[in-house]
Image (cartoon, rainbow, N blue to C red):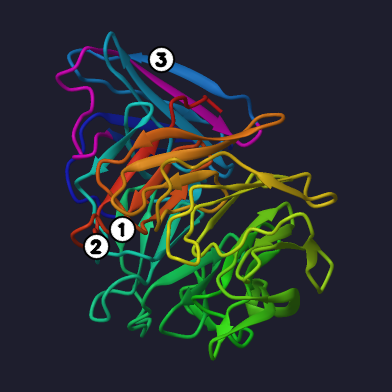
Amino acid sequence: MLVRAVLLGLVCVCASACSDDPVPFVFQAFVVDGENGNPAAGTDATTLRIGIQEGERPAQELEYPITEGQFDAVLSFESFVDQTRIRVAIEGLTIDLITAPPSFIPALTGGLMRVVTTAPGSCESIGFNFMEAPRTSFGMVQSDTFALLVGGTEATQEQVEFLDVLEWESRLFEQDLSLTNLGPTRAASVDENQILVLPSNAPAFIFDMDDALNRITPVVLHAGAGPRSALVSIPGVGAMVIGGELGGEAQAAVSLVMPEGQVTSLQLSEPRSGPAATTLGTDVLVVGGDPVGNAELLREGSSTGEPVTSLIDGIREVAVLVGDGQTRALLVGGTDDTGALRQDTVRFDGCPQGCVAMTGPTWTTARLEVLQPAQSTLLVGGTSSRLVEEVRWSTSDVEIASLLLLNAPRAAPGGIVLESGMFVVGGGNDGVSPRADFEFCAPDRLGLF
């Protein structure tokens, strides 16, 4: 694997295989800022902290001095084949930087990692790596230490590429994928390697990140599946395409796409065009997409949706439904039948057994084209917006809290959230044109593990 520039702030992680005849192995990790430079240079940084956890082994935290902006460290892996997590912090009197790359298996890498640092509660603009093409309204889905970027660009530009989040390198696939003009595109994980891609201008397909000989498998979905369908990933099950529109008519069909392209047909309790949906465990809550604006549950093992009788919300186009992944969800945004932006929200509690809908908090910063990354509670960017917010549930209440600001406005961007809570945001429209850059963001606090 290639590195485009000489990196500063070298952390050399050395390890020996646990055997009678150890074979030396060097894993290099470069700690950098968004311009590929030494983040400690010219600062009052005094301490480098590195946390490491391999598989189920106890986490270790090591401390190294920083002298006049220079630092290096040597760690010893106990295993090359366990899932490994690393946390890095740079501290001083006035400086506080953190980072955490995605978890990885050292033996399956090229022995190189680049970790970008940022201050807690902020985003670092990446100036050394860009997408192969500017993108907006595109699919961005994590697969292991990579992220697939697909669609959302001009027909003459690259339709598919990937970001190596461990190395911070954007690349094209070596194969000729023969994909052109996908248009606005969404994507969702089928499993850890296979991704369902739902373009606006082309038929749906599964993209396999792990099979270089068979990247693309066409998938036949229900009639009307497409831009007016909801799309969700159900962890451990597959991806679900819900409702849609055919010839101007809303559709009640649902397609559950499982690994290797197996499709199971399900049915909503009524036709829906443009609904919002989120997963609650292995069940799916579906809201709106019909004139009344009601809701239903697609329960695991059931072929037909189960209405949620406590909701009549009216027209709410292009709304976002944020779930806690278990029993609660919040419906935000969208426009009413006059095209006016809706600031009111609807909360759902006690799902799926006794799902109850009630009035939620006012979304004072309501906006369109907001990114809601998979398996997260974040609301990122939007039309003319740099704002990142988070839906937070307490025991009895829910709020929409301001988290941080992006460095640029991004309408309809892409993004992924790492298990540490750090997240990558890319592309989107800044009000002038689509963008090709990334930002790497951190919440206020980042635990060791």
Residue 262 pos. (x, y %): 68, 79
State yes or no: discs 1 and 2 in contact (Cβ < 8 Å).
yes
Callout 1: few (<14), some (14-19), or many (20+) C-alpha neighbours within 10 Å? many
Q: Return the disc, 2 or 3, that comes first in the chain's sequence.
A: 3
Residue tagged 2: 434
Residue at 69% in and 63% down: 294
Cα distance, mark 2 to mark 3?
Answer: 42 Å
Residue 306 visible within the image: yes
Q: Is residue 320 left or right of residue 382?
A: right
**Element under label 2?**
loop
Residue 209 visible within the image: no
Q: Is residue 172 magenta?
A: no
Kindly identify the amino acid type of the residue bearing the numbered disc 3.
Glu
Residue 161 pos. (x, y %): 35, 67
Kindly identify the amino acid type of the residue bearing the numbered disc 1.
Gly
Residue tagged 1: 428
Cα distance, mark 1 to mark 2?
Answer: 6 Å
State yes or no: discs 3 and 1 in contact (Cβ < 8 Å).
no
State which region is magenta.
32-56
Look at discs 3 and 1 and give the one toward the viewer: 1
Residue tagged 3: 63
Residue at 36% in and 85% down: 178
Q: Residue furthest front?
A: 338
Q: Residue furthest left?
A: 42
Look at discs 2 and 3 and give the one toward the viewer: 2
Residue at 36% in and 57% down: 413
Total numbered circles: 3
